[in-house]
Structures are given as C-alpha cells and as structure tokens.
Image (cartoon, rainbow, N blue to C red):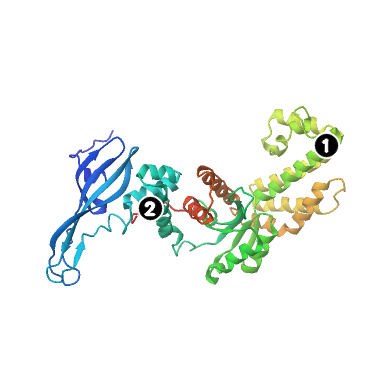
Amino acid sequence: MPHFTFTSPDLTTFCRLDELGLEATGQYLTLKQAVIECRVVEPDRWCGSCGAEGVPRDTVVRRLAHEPFGHRPTVLMVRVRRYRCPDCSRVWRQDTSKAAQRRAKISRRGLRWALTGIVVDHLTISRVAAGLGVSWNAANDAVLAEGRRVLIDDPHRFDDVTAIGVDEHVWRHTRKGDKFVTVVIDLTPIREKTGPARLLDMVEGRSKQVFKSWLANRPQEWRNKVEVVAMDGFTGFKTAASEELPDAVPVMDPFHVVRLVGDGLDRCRQRVQLATTGHRGRAGDPLYRARRTLHTGADLLTDKQQTRLDAVFAAEEHLEVEATWGIYQRIVAAYRHPDKKKGKEMMQAVIDAVTTGVPTALVEIRRLGRTLKQRAADVLAFFDRPGTSNGPTEAINGRLEHLRGSALGFRNLANYIARSLLESGGFRPVLHPGL
C-alpha cells in the first residue's frame, strides 16, 4: 500500500476551482444541493480603455452549476467585483471567462462532467440535468453547443480518412416522415489497428443520391485519399461510390455476405417446411428445431448439434436444405481461413459453383448466384484488404439504437445527429483539457 502525504483540507483544490480562476470563501450545504461561495482570483482592476486604476463600485453574484459531488448538485455562487474608471467613467467587472462562457449557466468543469457523462458513461440528458441541478433544456443546449464546438464543427474531424463504411440506419419508428438515415463511418483506425471506428456523419434519407451528394460535398483532396469503401449489397451505395470515388475499391464485407447467404438458407428451410408439412415450423418439427444449428459453423458444432443435423439431412425431402447449407458453410469457411489467398480461392470456387449449372429446384442458390456474380469483384476485394469490414459500422448502429432507446426516442433529427456524433464520433472529453 502506498504511503500518502496528506495536507490540510482545501475546498478550492478539492472542487478544482483553481482551474477556473476561482477561490472558495464559504460553503452552505442542504439535503438538495451544495452551494460554494467563491471569489475571482485575478483582480482585473485596470481600465481597458485608458489604463487607469479602477475604483471598486459594487459586487454582483453569478451563479454557475458545477460538477456534482455524489448525487447532490453543486452551485458556485461567484461574487464578481465591478470597477469604475475615475478618468473615463468606464464600468467593468472582473473577467470570469476562465470559469464559464459568457452568459453560461454551467461552469467549464460542469460542462466537462456533462460531456463525460454523455459520451463515456452513456447518461441521458435528464440524468445530466439532475446532476447539475438545471433544467433539461439548459443542459441539452449547453452540451450540444459545446459538443459542436469541440467535435462537430472541428475542421480536422475528416482528416486522414482512407477507408469508410456506409450503411442505412433507422432513427425513428414512426409512419410520418423519412425514418431512414445514411451513416458514414471512418474505418481507418480499424484498418491501421490504431483504435476503434468512429462515426463521421449522418445524412437524412437512404439512396444513391443521398450518399453521392455527401461525397460530392467533400473536398476533392479528401476524396482522393479514400482508398476503400465498405458497404452492404445495396447497389445505390456502390454506384455513388464509383461515380464520386473512382479510384476507391468497393468492398462487400463478410457480415453482409454471410447474412445474405443465411437469409437464403432460412427461406429455403421455410419453403421446404411448408411443402413437406403443409404448415409453418412448429416446436416438434425437425427443420424448425434445427433453425439455429443450421447457422452454426461446421467447425463449431457440438456432438448434439451434429446429430441433429444428421437426422435432418437423412430425410430425402430435405435435400435442398442440405445443398443450401453446404454453400453457406463453404462461404463461412472461406472467410475463416487463416490464409487470405487460400480463402479467396475458396470464395472464387463458391461463386463459380452457384453461378453455373445450378438445378432449377434450388431457387435460393440460383438467386444467390445472380447476386454474387454481379458483386463478385466487391466480395473478393475483401481478401486483398483484410480488416476492411462493415462490421464496425453495424456495431456503431447498435450503439445508436441504445442511444435512441435510452432517450425514449428522438423527434428532432438535428439533435439526434449531434448526440450520435458525441456518442460514436470518437470524442473523448478527458482528452480535451481546454474544456
């Protein structure tokens, strides 16, 4: 156990008021809040117009919400002295800009606490407002304004981006208005193994034109640096990227390829289930009981799962399901192969197998073959650029789902975009000592 050197209690240091240019002169505690009386350390008694020494006139009080200690809001009651110039009659007050912005209701330390709570601890605005002892609107306006200043409006936020991911996201579940947005993710940290992916921007709507317009609004120098665009199977994103980023390589990531094949496997299972039993899957039906086992990698199957699959495939009427399952397993095996060159050869063999000579009865495989034939170059591009996946994009979408749920939904898209950027834009308040 380390040996601490204790000093006398100092309220100024404990509450970190010295960072705000303040000094504690008194305290008043109640069950609902803690009030700390402060004074400004710098006298600031010289006239800014003529340089003469001012004469003290009176004192005004500025109340600031401060970072809470425990569950009790803390209020700073700052006594600010006003001066009058005897020569030019100018009146001014001590400078408190180090403690808080002009006309702000929250101290800079309080803002840092609020941003840390929003970004790191994933608190709601309601919880932050309660901790600061201010109204919801005051907390929301202050947090969003500071977030825009330090992150959203930062001109260097788009610097050094070489790989991006694009996907759609549902920002509200209502019948009125467009509920979809297009999210653009910076995958460069994942690709270079320097950190997590981050949200670059969010645009209303989901279409080729939406993504194309967003790319067109970026400087040409920025677009020239983008080398890879990871996306799902939506051709609109691919066309927009090809037109605005002609030198970038589109990559259809493993997440969406495996999901595409998995959806085909489910449709095949459901079709065969209905054809052989005359009804949808029920608890006692072999195909329905094996629905999750069918999506398990062959190298991860337990003895019980393998026995269940053997029983399903033993029935001749389940031959189409077995064939589709085989294609699914070959694609999963290609992505899991440690040698990317060998994995690419395995994937090419699968694409060749599903695009020619497929029996008419294998409806789902024929449909998959048409898609893979059209996007073959994009699917195979992943193996030449390992680490370029839209998986982090889906992970950020999941974080945004949690954000929307904790806020019980959003009605204003601008607020949702701002909160999303703070949540997933790579912003860390603890790394910004200027707050």
- Is residue 411 left or right of 259 when viewed as pictured? left
**Does any portion of residue 319 appear in the rendered image?**
yes
Q: Quadrant of residue 243?
A: bottom right
Q: Quadrant of residue 183?
A: bottom right
Q: Residue at x 69, y 39 (%)?
A: 297
Q: Quadrant of residue 329?
A: top right
Residue type pointed to by label 1 = Leu
Q: Nearer the viewer, residue 241 or 57?
A: 57
Q: Nearer the viewer, residue 193 or 408?
A: 408
Q: Nearer the viewer, residue 16 or 83?
A: 83
* Residue assigned mark 2: 431
Residue type pointed to by label 2 = Leu
Q: Where residue 246 appears, x then y in whole percent?
A: 64, 68
- Which of pointers 1 and 2 indicates the residue nearer the eye? 1
Q: Where residue 234 appears, x then y in whole percent?
A: 69, 56
Identify the disc placed on residue 274: 1
Using the numbered discs, state the Cα–Cα distance from disc 1 to disc 2 in whole angstroms.
58 Å
Q: Is residue 59 above or below residue 75?
A: below
Q: Is residue 428 above or below residue 318?
A: below
Q: Quadrant of the C terminus?
A: bottom left
Q: Residue at x 54, y 62 (%)?
A: 162
Q: Where residue 129 appears, x then y in whole percent?
A: 39, 45
Q: Residue at x 31, y 47 (%)?
A: 66
Counting residues from the start of the chain, the first of labels 1 and 2 encountered is 1
Q: Where residue 211 appears, x then y in whole percent?
A: 61, 62
Q: Residues within 10 Å of mark 1 (few under 14, many from 20)?
A: few
User: What element does badge 2 sit on?
Assistant: helix
User: What element does badge 1 sit on?
Assistant: helix
- Is residue 158 left or right of 59 when viewed as pictured? right
Q: Nearer the viewer, residue 343 or 27?
A: 27
Q: Are marks 1 and 2 in contact (CB under 8 Å)?
A: no
